[in-house]
Image (cartoon, rainbow, N blue to C red):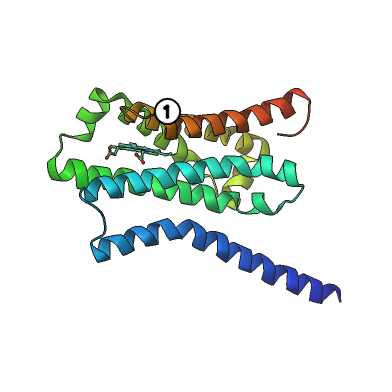
């Protein structure tokens, strides 16, 4: 009986794992589909760079929402997929920067160094990406063991700054309507506020 329950639980876990994986991969597949059918709009490079940037930030914010969601619902399921969703956020960020560097700058731009010094939003985006690199590099179980839980958790607090820098990059980029980046900033403010509240109350964050 216990073995049957375990088997059921593990097949349900596998199903969940695949559902989350496919959910994270879908925006990339959609982009591939639009490229194949020539549906990338009047400015294909802009569509590609923006779509990848949007999903990097969405998944990063989702990663940050999973622990508060666990506290809210009492279910541990959301945090079980935190590493996978975080790695997808990183993958989208890398693809976003690669698409920009290769397609935009590579085809008709200056150099990334010129851009970094002349456009503050690029500098902020780069800072966000640089913070995500050690997080992705230490996301394996082996690295968690090697660093030890405490040091690993301390290092992974960088994700809070990366989220803010990602949203700040978006805010600095837009010229007129700041609604979208402000939504991300408000969401991050809410998530960090919830954590700060728990921390002040001496509860685990
Ligand atoms: C070296 C690092 C980065 C560079 C060079 C870069 C470059 C860019 C550029 C050029 C755009 C504007 C695209 C356009 O106007 O056509 C953009 C937009 C954006 N980027 Fe980045 N980015 C970087 C890092 C990041 C990171 C780490 C994130 C997320 C965590 C991110 C999220 C976004 C978002 C959300 C947008 C706005 C998309 C939209 O308008 O819908 N970027 N980025």
Using residue 103 as the reference point, say whether residue 51 is left or right of it: right
Q: Callout 1: few (<14), some (14-19), or many (20+) C-alpha neighbours within 10 Å?
A: some
Residue depicted at x 36% and y 30%: 177
Using residue 83 as the reference point, say whether residue 162 is left or right of it: left
| Residue at the spot of label 1 | 168
Q: Is residue 172 above or below residue 44?
A: above
Residue depicted at x 54% and y 53%: 84
Q: Is residue 34 above or below residue 105?
A: below
- As helix, strand or loop, the secondary structure at mark 1 comes to helix
Q: Is the C terminus in the top left, top right, bottom left or bottom right quadrant?
A: top right
Using residue 8 as the reference point, say whether residue 146 is left or right of it: left
Q: Quadrant of residue 34?
A: bottom left
What x and y, as percent, mark residue 184? Answer: 49, 34
Residue depicted at x 78% and y 25%: 201
What x and y, as percent, mark residue 66? Answer: 63, 44
What x and y, as percent, mark residue 80? Answer: 65, 53
Q: Is the N terminus in the top left, top right, bottom left or bottom right quadrant?
A: bottom right
Residue depicted at x 71% and y 26%: 197
Given residues 56 and 190, the one toward you in this image is 190
Q: Is residue 37 above or below residue 92?
A: below
What x and y, as percent, mark residue 189? Answer: 57, 28
């Amino acid at each position: 009986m216990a073995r049957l329950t375990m088997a059921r639980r593990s097949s349900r876990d596998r199903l969940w794992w695949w559902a989350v994986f496919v959910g994270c991969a879908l925006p990339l597949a959609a982009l591939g589909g639009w490229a194949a059918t020539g549906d990338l709009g009047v400015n294909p490079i802009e569509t590609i760079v923006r779509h990848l940037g949007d999903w990097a930030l969405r998944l990063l914010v989702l990663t940050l929402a999973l622990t508060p969601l666990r506290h809210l619902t009492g279910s541990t399921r959301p945090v079980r997929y935190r590493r996978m969703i975080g790695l997808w956020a990183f993958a989208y960020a890398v693809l976003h920067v690669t698409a920009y560097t290769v397609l935009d700058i590579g085809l008709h731009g200056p150099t990334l160094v010129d851009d970094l010094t002349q456009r503050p939003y690029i500098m902020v985006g780069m800072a966000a990406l640089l913070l995500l690199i050690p997080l992705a590099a230490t996301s394996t179980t082996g690295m968690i063991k090697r660093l030890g839980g405490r040091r690993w958790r301390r290092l992974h607090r960088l994700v809070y700054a990366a989220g803010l820098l990602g949203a700040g990059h978006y805010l600095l980029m837009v010229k007129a309507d700041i609604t979208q980046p402000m939504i991300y900033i408000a969401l991050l403010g809410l998530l960090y506020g919830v954590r700060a509240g728990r921390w002040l109350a001496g509860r685990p964050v």
